[in-house]
Image (spheres, helix red, strand yellow):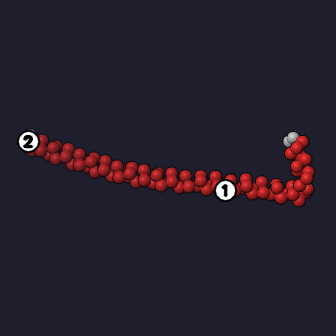
Amino acid sequence: MDVDTLASFTQLGTAGLIGWMWLSERRAAAERERQLTELHERLLQERRGLEVAVEALRDVVRVLTSVEASQRALAGAIERLGARAA
């Protein structure tokens, strides 16, 4: 801290210094609150994105399960036709 700044603080007096410290703390707290709010919003957006991705993955799994069941049915039909021909 330089001499000019120190001289300015001493002119404020104790009450002025306490008031300045309180205002500084309030500004810092407001900035922290703003940062936390922004982070919270980003997390909520990411959560929504993840929910969409999980739902899409569930749909893909359902489709693949259906394809597998169809292939098994087709393979079974081919085996039965082969057994009849023999």
* The N terminus, quarter of image: top right
Residue for point 78% across, 57% down:
23
Residue 17's place in the image compared with 79, above or below, is: below
- Farthest residue toward the left? 85
Residue for point 59% across, 53% down:
38
Percent coordinates x, y for residue 64 in the rendering = 31, 47
Residue 20 placement, left or right of 50: right
Type of residue at label 1?
Glu
Percent coordinates x, y for residue 14 in the rendering = 91, 57
Residue for point 82% across, 55% down:
20
* The C terminus, quarter of image: top left
Q: Which circle, 2 or 1, is nearer the viewer?
A: 1
Task: Give me the disc on residue 33.
Answer: 1
Question: What residue did someone put label 2 on?
Answer: 85
Per the model, the C-alpha gap separating discs 2 and 1 is 77 Å
Disc 2 and disc 1 in contact, CB within 8 angstroms: no
Q: Quadrant of residue 71?
A: top left
User: Counting other residues with Cα less than 10 Å from the Cα at mark 2, is it few (<14), some (14-19), or many (20 or more)?
Assistant: few
Which is nearer the eye, 67 or 16? 16
SS at mark 1? helix
Q: In which quarter of the image is residue 41?
A: bottom right
Percent coordinates x, y for residue 56 in the rendering = 38, 51
Q: Which of marks 2 and 1 is nearer the N terminus?
A: 1
Task: Give me the disc on residue 6.
Answer: none
SS at mark 2? helix
Residue 16 placement, left or right of 40: right
Type of residue at label 2?
Ala
Residue for point 77% across, 55% down:
25
Residue 10 placement, left or right of 36: right
